[in-house]
């Protein structure tokens, strides 16, 4: 059963604990949404330009990983990281071709591995870290709080797409 309360978490500063609570709720709803999907469900393409559920799940994990690198290490992906995550980040034709033939556990394990890294990093941060400001290359300001809001926003957006794909699967 899901707990729909945003509360501080043990071993985290107050606001970071609330952020962790939101990240966990977002993830738990996603995991509930994808529970029991078959490999065929995960690989289903509604059109020849669609993303599969598996590709969307891989993308969600990749976005969280990228935001770890940007916010915790204050850098962009290096070449080997980009090579590992590129297809999941960009999706498109390469995603349709290469992100498939994996069981649900594969995607859940990816989620779990990346999230463990996030939680480890977040335990070492304090609330003021959330408000540290940086600038993108185009001189637009952002802070670490925004980056982690975006991780949740991205997952919730793609969860909506997953729900639409599941409705299409019921009609096939």
Image (spheres, rainbow, N blue to C red):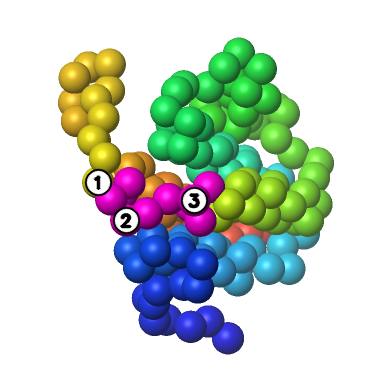
* Magenta span includes 125: yes
Q: Residue at x 62, y 42 (%)?
A: 58
* Image position of 38 (left or right of 168): right
Question: In the rendered structure, are the residues bearing label 1 and label 2 in contact, judged by CB atoms less than 8 Å apart?
Answer: yes
Label 2 residue SS: helix
Q: Position of residue 139 (x, y in %)?
A: 19, 19
Which stretch is magenta?
Answer: 121-130
Q: Is residue 42 visible?
A: no
User: Disc 2 marks which residue?
Assistant: 127
Disc on res. 131? 1
Give the alpha-carbon distance from disc 3 to disc 1, as whole Å. 15 Å
User: Disc 3 marks which residue?
Assistant: 124
Give the alpha-carbon distance from disc 3 to disc 2, as whole Å. 10 Å
Q: Position of residue 100 (x, y in %)?
A: 74, 39
* Image position of 63 (left or right of 154): right
Residue 17 falls in which quadrant of the image? bottom left
Q: Is residue 137 visible?
A: yes
Instruction: Give the prevailing secondary structure in the magenta stretch.
Output: helix
């Amino acid at each position: 059963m899901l707990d729909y309360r945003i509360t501080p978490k043990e071993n985290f500063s107050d606001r970071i604990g609330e952020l962790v609570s939101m990240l966990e709720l977002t993830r738990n709803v996603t995991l509930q949404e994808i529970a029991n999907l078959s490999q065929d469900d995960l690989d289903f393409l509604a059109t020849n330009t669609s993303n599969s559920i598996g590709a969307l799940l891989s993308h969600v994990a990749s976005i969280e990983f990228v935001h770890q690198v940007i916010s915790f290490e204050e850098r962009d992906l290096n070449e080997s990281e980009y090579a590992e995550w590129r297809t999941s980040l960009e999706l498109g034709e390469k995603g349709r071709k290469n992100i498939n033939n994996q069981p649900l556990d594969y995607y859940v394990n990816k989620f779990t591995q990346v999230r463990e890294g996030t939680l480890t990093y977040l335990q070492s941060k304090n609330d003021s870290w959330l408000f540290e400001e940086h600038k993108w290359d185009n001189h637009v300001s952002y802070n670490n709080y925004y980056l982690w809001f975006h991780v949740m926003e991205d997952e919730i957006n793609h969860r909506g797409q997953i729900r639409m794909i599941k409705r299409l699967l019921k009609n096939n």
